[in-house]
Amino acid sequence: MNDLVVKSNYLIQAQYTLTLRQQQLLYIVLDLISKDDDELKTYNVSVKDYIKKTNSETNKDIYADMQTAVEGLRNRDLIFTSTKYGESKHFKWVSYAHYSRNRGYIEIGFDPRLKPYLLQLKEEFTKLSLARMLSFSSHHSCRVYELLKQYERIGSRTMSLVEFKGFLGFQPFQYKVYGELKRKVLIKAQTEINKNTDISFDFEEIKENKKVESLKFNIHVKKGTIENSADTKNINELVITTKEVDETEDKLKEIQKILENKITKGEARTLYIRADGDIEKIRQAYNYAMEVSKEQKIKNFMGFIIHLLELPEIPKLIKLNKIKNPQSNFEQRNYSPEYFKELERKLLGWDEDIVDEQDN
């Protein structure tokens, strides 16, 4: 067994919900996949091995728990969302899952369509310590750790609440009150990750109209414990080396200037990454968002710009008059409220019921 497990960033970015035992079981199976395998196999895990690797208590209940975990795993969904095309693909984690209680063995077969995300990964992956992944007491802590390890070298990660809850597999009706999410998920994950792993993090709450809409995670690597090294590559990130940081410093300042110095350098870096370094696209997205904001209130301005940057191209404003915005190539227009309501719904998938009320 190798302590480091290679996990595709597509899997880390996917949306899914697993129990802690299911997550641990899948990590043990991932460790069985050889880097030279060219086909997926049926993988066997003994309950005794599971108990040893997870430091679980040996008792009769764990065998019943494994039965439940394996049966539930057959129906667990895995959703990949393309930021470029705005499309979602739905998979099942496994095509075959069997538990022989008499023999104490579990057999797992992955959905064959997951082959590109499981075998011979040469890029877009993150290395994770198997021992650490099996030591978490909460599945949510495990997922938060994965999401932060993916951006370890960049040092920060900003996510809207909707995006964050999606990664953790929450339904829109869950944790509608931000304070509950903070108390039951964020603080618990922070305590566990900061105490027991190779990184620590703190987070900033980004508010719109006094409501928390986004979270910025600041990631700190503990000395002597870096595991990803230069092998880690991020699916939606430019892997920023020291040289690249120096080269992009002026660009980050330019982005801040474009947004009238109303954003932090970390937020500027997020926009730079989402636009693949295309400063002009960021300028166009900001100008477009400003035009939209003149006609209708944007609930999450930063989130709106990010979603614009993830479109194949920035939508063009239809010319209705000759009043030009001096900061852009767009011409100012008057739109009906219905137009912006539909645009907002399509771009961001917003729903009145999804907006969380922050408790006091």
Image (cartoon, rainbow, N blue to C red):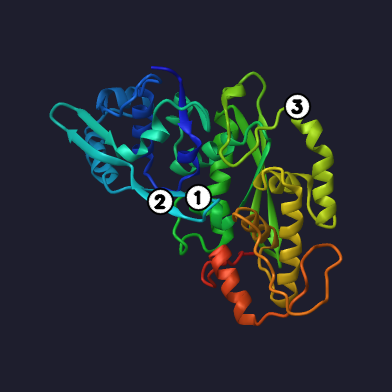
Are circles 2 and 3 on residues that touch, CB within 8 Å? no
Please identify the quadrant where the N terminus is shown: top left
Disc assigned to residue 242: 3
Q: Which of disc 3 and disc 2 is earlier in sequence?
A: 2
Q: Which of disc 1 and disc 2 is earlier in sequence?
A: 1
* Horizontal relation, residue 78 to residue 339: left or right: left
291 is higher (above) or lower (below) than 12: below
Is label 3 in a helix, a strand or a loop? helix
Residue 226 visible to the viewer: no
Q: Nearer the viewer, residue 304 or 27?
A: 304
Q: Position of residue 207 (x, y in %)?
A: 70, 60
200 is higher (above) or lower (below) than 341: above
Are circles 2 and 1 on residues that touch, CB within 8 Å? yes
Q: Amino acid at mark 1?
A: Ser
Q: Amino acid at mark 3?
A: Thr
Q: Position of residue 219 (x, y in %)?
A: 66, 36
Give the quadrant of residue 235: top right
Disc assigned to residue 89: 2
Q: Position of residue 185 (x, y in %)?
A: 52, 49
Is label 1 in a helix, a strand or a loop? loop
Give the quadrant of residue 115: top left
Residue of label 1: 82
Q: CA distance from mark 1 to mark 3?
A: 29 Å
Q: Nearer the viewer, residue 14 or 213?
A: 14
Q: CA distance from mark 2 to mark 1?
A: 8 Å
Near mark 2 (Cα within 10 A), the count class, few <14, some 14-19 or many ≥20, is: few
* Horizontal relation, residue 92 to residue 143: left or right: left
51 is higher (above) or lower (below) than 238: above
Residue 4 visible to the viewer: yes
Mark closer to the observer (2, 3) = 2
Q: Amino acid at mark 2?
A: Lys
Q: CA distance from mark 2 to mark 3?
A: 36 Å
